Image (cartoon, helix red, strand yellow):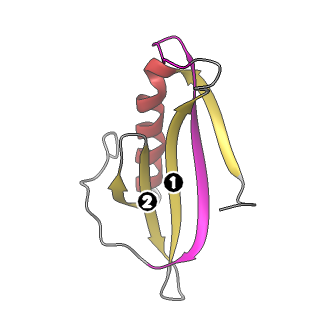
Amino acid sequence: GPGVPVRCVTTPMQYVPQVAYTFAGEAQRNGWTPVTQTSSSIWMQKANNGGTCERMIIFGFWDNVATPQSRPDTPGYVGVVNQTAHPCLTPTVTPTPNAQ
């Protein structure tokens, strides 16, 4: 939501999925569980002591105003946002690649 800080890295679009899965794999090794995935995002969660979950959303995007059609060399971004105190979700995806 508004006011939630987003951390981003930039890479050519052809590498955005690899970077996102690398981030997700590292999060998994640190106790985060993947719960759902879309064509451009991976949602992860970690239970906290209050009966709710912290949420991490890893997502890929590009500036579709400057570049309406993405190409492999188009500058892309992988964003990560953390949110606290959300209801825990039932996982609907299998663990992410590179989690071992």
Magenta stretch in the rendered image: 68-87
Which percent across, then down, holds residue 24?
44, 47
Tell me: 58 left or right of 39.
Answer: right
Residue farthest along the right direction in this orientation = 3
What is the three-letter code of the residue carrying label 1?
Answer: Ile
Assess disc 2: are there few (<14), some (14-19) or many (≥20) residues with their C-alpha within 10 Å of its C-alpha.
many
- Residue at 65 percent of width and 62 percent of height: 1
Q: Is residue 26 above or below residue 60?
A: below
- Residue at 44 percent of width and 46 percent of height: 41
Of the 4 image quadrants, the one containing the C terminus is: top left
Magenta span has 82? yes
Which percent across, then down, holds residue 97?
30, 41
Magenta span has 83? yes
Which percent across, then down, holds residue 20?
46, 38
Disc assigned to residue 44: 2
Tell me: 74 left or right of 17.
Answer: right
39 or 28, which lies in front?
39
Circle 2 — which element? Answer: strand
Q: Where is mark 1, residue-wise?
A: 57
Magenta stretch, main secondary structure, is strand
Disc assigned to residue 16: none
What is the three-letter code of the residue carrying label 2?
Answer: Met
Precedes in sequence: disc 2 or disc 1: 2
Q: CA distance from mark 2 to mark 1?
A: 6 Å
